[in-house]
Image (cartoon, rainbow, N blue to C red):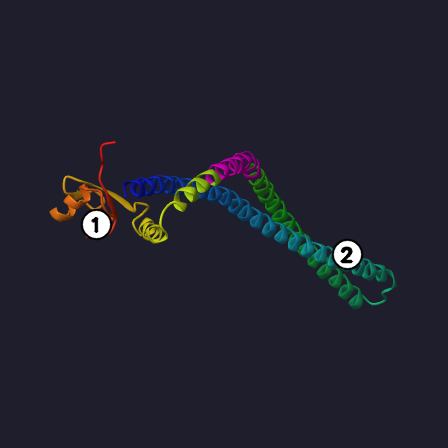
Amino acid sequence: MQNKMNLLRDLQEVDQEISAIEATRQGYRDELGAFEADATRVQEMLDQLNDEVALLQQSEAELQQGLLKERDNVTRVEARLPEIQTQKEYVAVLKEIDVAKKANKDVEEQMQSKQQEVTTLEEDLKEKETELAAIHEKSEARGAELKQLLTESEEVLLKRTQTRESVAEELPVSLLRKYHTLFKRRGGLALALASHGACLGCNMKLPPQQYNRLLQVAEIQTCPHCNRILYVETEA
Ligand SMILES: [Zn+2]
């Protein structure tokens, strides 16, 4: 009986260690995940900016094409001027040229404003690229550290798991199952010390008769309040 209690206490100790190691490992993985999320976020911004720049450059190219065509038209119309016979027609053609030149000037201004937008976006792009590079640099250094920590803690975890298995092997299955359920439900504390007539797991008083039986260390008993398996400190 005492032996079983000692095994259970060993088991709980190693299980608590395993839980702590797993929590730490989860922390490492979360940290790694945060770097990846950061990098993805900035990369998405970069992609979006690149798309915007590409669109602007495309519409700039279209404007440029239209402008070239319009300039050709102006040249063609101007070439007709010497052949014109009547004053009326001459004025009409001059007006046509004037309108076309004004339209071209508008297009040139539109192109300039697109170029300005592209320049601004390219500055944004550069900024985001720097940000992304910084994230990569940081995540590479810390990431290598984290991976190392994960590897090391995995080795410790493996050792602890082997220990827990060898301890568990020596306990009856029904008791193990009870212990497991309690360990999960009671926040990693399946066993509670009983002292001065009370359960220290929930700090409730135990029935005096039960406490007396407990002191005799004759059977496995559970707290009537929190259900934890009770043990008493015995003089070694
Ligand atoms: Zn209790």
Indicate yes or no: mark 1 CB to ligand 1 under 8 Å. yes
In the rendered image, the quadrant that contains the N terminus is top left
Residue at 85% over, 59% down: 79
How far apart, in angstroms, are the residues tagged by discs 1 and 2? Answer: 92 Å
Residue 137 location in percent, x, y? 57, 35
Callout in the foreground (1, 2): 1
Q: Which residue is more in the foreground, 156 or 116? A: 156
Placement of 18 over or under 52, stated as above or below: above
Work out which residue is located at the far right of the displayed protein and give it: 83
Residue 23 showing in the rendered view: no
Work out which residue is located at the far top of the displayed protein and give it: 236
Magenta stretch mostly in which secondary structure? helix
Residue at 14% over, 42% down: 197
Residue 31 showing in the rendered view: yes
Q: Earlier in the sequence, mark 1 or mark 2?
A: 2
Q: Tag 1, which secondary structure? A: loop
Q: Which residue is more in the foreground, 67 or 88? A: 67
Q: Which residue is more in the foreground, 104 or 132? A: 132
Taking the image as shown, residue 171 lies to the left or right of residue 94, namely left
Amino acid type, label 2: Leu
Q: Look at mark 1 in the image and give the residue it sits on.
A: 223
Residue 16 location in percent, x, y? 36, 41
Mark 2 surroundings: few (<14), some (14-19) or many (≥20) residues within 10 A: few
Residue extent of the magenta highlight: 135-157
Q: Look at mark 2 in the image and give the residue it sits on.
A: 68
